[in-house]
Amino acid sequence: MTEFLKEAERLIRGRGFNVYRITEICRGEGETAVLQYANPCQDVYSVAKVFTTTAAMILIDRGMLSLDERVVDIFRAELPRDIDAKWEKVTLHHLLTHRAGFSSGQLDIDCLDSTKFGCNDYLQLLLTTPLISEAGEKHTYSDAAFYMVSRIVSKKLGEPMDDFLWREIFTPCGFREVAWSKCPLGYPMGATGLYIRTDDLAKLGQIYLSGGLYNGKRILSEKAVSTVLEKGYELKWHGSYYAKGGMRGSMLQIIPEKNRVVAWTACDDSDMDELLKLGTNF
């Protein structure tokens, strides 16, 4: 076990954090510490949004999508007759920044009973729901935005987004088990419900740390990586590291100065700021 992981384990056990596994990739070498014998694949909740963002950026790299493309143009054939006029201004960028105008909590399958949504077609459910603000006007964190990004990627490709990710990221980067919660029509939820190993989660961080490469293979362009990090598309800058956390404490952390990626899965709502700082100070 690396010295960092030994120190992380001491901190986790000393603070009583309910962490299952923690992975460190440092200078391209990865290792995982198993702290509890739980299922190696865990729901990373909102960390899933980084994968959805990455899928969209791959399509942008290929000229199949743009950040200023409007939702109404992408789904022209699916638009309901009584759609809220505010949808006319909503772009992919607004979805990726949670400024599309959704209300908080929409399509949150982690907290809501999806059997009570009253509709099997979640895209139509969103398109027929009035937006609460104009595009770009207000930041409101909502899983609905990233379900829609999942649907956009799937629409552009003609296949579910997770099938594309298996081909473009999961298989080339040696991911093992991956599963994604889906809507009744078979599309990944995009915002949450991603079950994955910590060592595979860390590999996504390594792609961003390496400017879009994984073991020498180009996954994303350098421009796409810069766009995500500069615009704060889920991976937010915290002064010395980028990070995206999920409910129950799961985390993906990228520390450029240390050439380190750290990922962990957990079932703990404690403040783990000490663990985040360890990766930058060790």
Image (cartoon, rainbow, N blue to C red):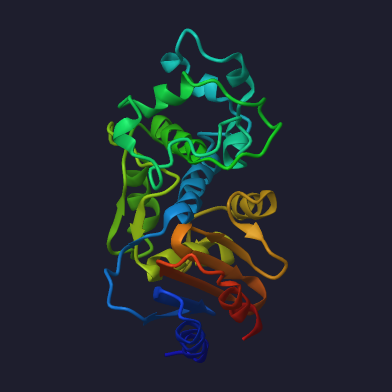
- Compared with residue 222, is residue 131 higher up or lower down, i.e. above or below? above
Q: Quadrant of residue 239?
A: bottom right
Viewport quadrant of the C terminus: bottom right
- Closest to the observer: 260 or 17? 17
Using the rendered image of the protein, determine whether residue 172 is visible from the camera's viewpoint.
Answer: yes
Q: Nearer the viewer, residue 151 or 121?
A: 121
Q: Quadrant of residue 88?
A: top right
Q: Is residue 250 visible?
A: no
Which residue occupies 48% across, 82% down? 12
| 163 vs 196, nearest the viewer | 196
Seen at 61% across and 26% down, the residue is 132
Whole-percent x, y for residue 11 in the image = 52, 85
Quadrant that contains the N terminus? bottom left
Question: Residue visible at 47% across and 52% down?
Answer: 46
Furthest residue in direction top, as rendered: 81
Q: Residue at x 47, y 21 (%)?
A: 127
Q: Above or below — where is 232 with respect to 80? A: below
Asked which quadrant contains residue 68, the reply is top right
Horizontal and vertical percent position of residue 122:
38, 28
- Name the residue nearer the viewer: 108 or 282: 108
1 in relation to 47, above or below:
below
